[in-house]
Image (cartoon, rainbow, N blue to C red):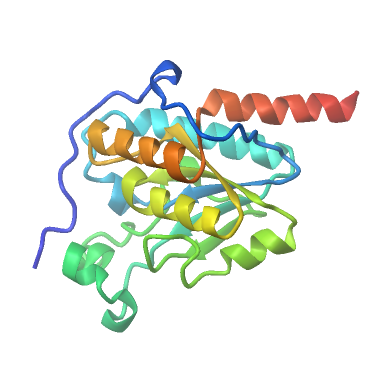
Amino acid sequence: MRVSLPKIQPYPLPEAAELPSGRVDWQVDPSRAALLVHDMQRYFLAPYAGSPIPEVVANVAALADACRERGVPVFYTAQPGRQDPADRGLLTQFWGDGIGAVIDTDPTAADIVDDLAPGPDDTVLEKWRYSAFQRSALAELLAASGRDQLVVTGVYAHIGCQTTAVEAFMRDVQPFLVADAVADFSRAHHDQACDYVASRCGVVTTTADVRAALAAEMTTGVS
């Protein structure tokens, strides 16, 4: 059985000046956007030995609070603690039993970390594959709420976050990968995800820029 997750050494988050230039000039629009908090469960954060997790958690929390204040839907994904082998499928061959390998000794492993606890109006989607759209109601929920932009945060940037961004694009939903609100196995993996999204399917942005877009819309609405 393969080791499920590697130990992850600290690394600095990319700064705004280091982000790749994109192919499109899409802007976050609070009337069109939804926020995704991807797999921020104790199991997936346990391998980190420090940065960038404290910074990422703080940035995701700030984005979630700003979205809730402005009526922007907030979605979470979370893998179940116990998964039937038929449901887990090929993931087992790459990552072993995942959360199921530790859930008996750590009953909290599947929990979303406390600082990012979902609010009463947030939606938590059960997660089965890399993309948050697979075997979930995410696409239908976005359509029902008139949302065609998805702001992606969480872990891991080059796996589930990138795959979700690609599938959003293929469903004509504009993805925004928040470079300082995602984390990965290394800075190289992190940069790889940012480069791919910027050049192939979406916009790579920052927490500050997304919050500014939300605040600007709020100001416009008040005036």
Return the x and y of residue 63 as percentages of the image width and height: 57, 35
Whether 128 is drawn above or below 18: the answer is below
Return the x and y of residue 219 as percentages of the image width and height: 81, 24
Q: Work out whether residue 160 or residue 194 is closer to the camera in this orientation and state it.
A: 194
Farthest top residue in view: 17
Residue sitting at 46 percent across and 31 percent down?
A: 58
Residue sitting at 44 percent across and 44 percent down?
A: 200
Q: Is residue 49 in view from this perspective?
A: yes
How many discs appear?
Answer: 0
**101 lies left or right of 34:** left
Return the x and y of residue 183 as percentages of the image width and height: 34, 38
Return the x and y of residue 90 as percentages of the image width and height: 25, 73
Farthest bottom residue in view: 86
**105 lies left or right of 22:** left
Farthest right residue in view: 223
Q: To which quarter of the image does residue 157 belong?
A: top left
**221 lies left or right of 8:** right
Q: Is residue 40 in view from this perspective?
A: no
Residue sitting at 53 percent across and 55 percent down?
A: 168
